[in-house]
Image: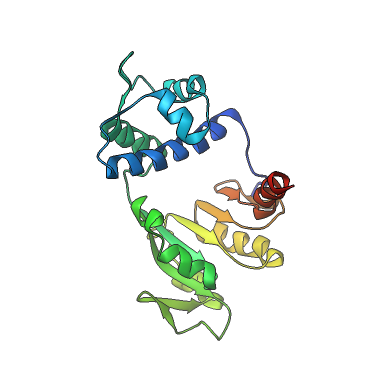
């Protein structure tokens, strides 16, 4: 199988997608408050993103607003949800049953985006056989026997950094097409997978810079 190094992507399209996710979060809040219309200048004040950039981001995917009026909040929220793929259900397998897994399962935002955790695996006897919110924690040693790529869309990997590569290799052989992991290192993955990294040290660098 052909393999390649995958690193966190920072191209223009991915940066736009990240900002769309921020807009969607704001639109969720505004819809909950009963706001019907919002302007790009209002989004600028909320998100700290210039209104010209907001307009350019949205223009990448079509025409959504009315000049001089603004954007219909429920309609724009629906369009962005569709663009990001949140208009369909996504079945998720969690690799690692620590505290982070529990946070995800109980996350309102996670559920709001139609992300449903359907299986959990761990290698620790402290977790195997137990359950989180009714989802049994299965033995990582049985991953190939118990995980079916036809019933799972993507994986979230929360294991120690030295175990990430081996975990991705196993998921790739099973046929899982997408994965997100939390380790500050590039990994080698199968061509048939999309793998993204969320490096907390990068976010902490922004935080410590601001505090300094």
User: How many dots with numbers?
Assistant: 0
Q: In the rendered image, which quarter is residue 20 located in?
A: top left
Query: In the orientation shown, which residue stands out farthest toward the top?
Result: 67
Name the residue at 29% across, 40% down. 31
Give the residue at x 35% y 44%.
29
Give above or below for 191 relative to 132.
Answer: above
Percent of width and height locating residue 6: 66, 45
Return the residue nearer the eye: 211 or 36. 211
- From the viewer's perspective, is 169 left or right of 138? right
Compare residues 200 and 175 and report the one nearer the observer: 200
Vertical side of 134 occupied by 195: above or below? above
Expressed as whole percent of the image width and height from the top left, the position of residue 117 reads: 40, 63
Q: Tell me if 43 is positioned left or right of 112 in this view.
A: right
Residue 122: percent from the left, percent from the top? 54, 75
Q: Residue furthest front?
A: 212
Say which residue appears at 65% left-offset and 46% top-offset. 2
Answer above or below: position of 149 versus 197. Answer: below
In the image shown, does 59 or 55 lie closer to the viewer?
A: 55
Residue found at the very far right of the displayed protein: 212
Residue in front for this viewpoint, 159 or 58: 58
Q: Residue at x 50, y 72 (%)?
A: 121
Residue 153's place in the image compared with 62, above or below, is below
User: Looking at the image, what colour scheme do you see?
Assistant: rainbow
Q: In the image, 170: left or right of 62?
A: right
């Amino acid at each position: 199988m052909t393999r390649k190094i995958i690193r966190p992507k920072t191209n223009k399209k991915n940066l736009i997608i990240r900002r769309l996710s921020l807009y969607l979060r704001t639109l969720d809040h505004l819809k909950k408050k009963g706001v019907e219309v919002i302007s790009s200048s209002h989004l600028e004040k909320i998100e700290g993103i210039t209104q010209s950039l907001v307009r350019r981001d949205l223009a990448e995917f079509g025409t959504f607003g009315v000049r001089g009026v603004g954007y219909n909040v429920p309609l724009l929220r629906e369009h962005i949800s569709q663009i990001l793929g949140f208009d369909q259900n996504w079945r998720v397998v969690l690799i690692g049953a620590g505290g982070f897994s529990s946070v995800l399962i109980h996350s309102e935002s996670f559920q709001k985006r139609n992300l449903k955790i359907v299986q959990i695996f761990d290698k620790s006897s402290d977790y195997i056989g137990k359950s989180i919110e009714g989802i049994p924690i299965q033995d990582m040693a049985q991953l190939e026997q118990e995980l079916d790529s036809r019933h799972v869309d993507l994986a979230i990997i929360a294991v120690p950094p030295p175990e990430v590569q081996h975990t991705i290799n196993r998921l790739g052989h099973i046929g899982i097409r997408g994965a997100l992991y939390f380790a500050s290192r590039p990994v080698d993955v199968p061509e048939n997978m999309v793998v993204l990294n969320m490096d907390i040290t990068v976010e902490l660098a922004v935080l410590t810079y601001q505090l300094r």
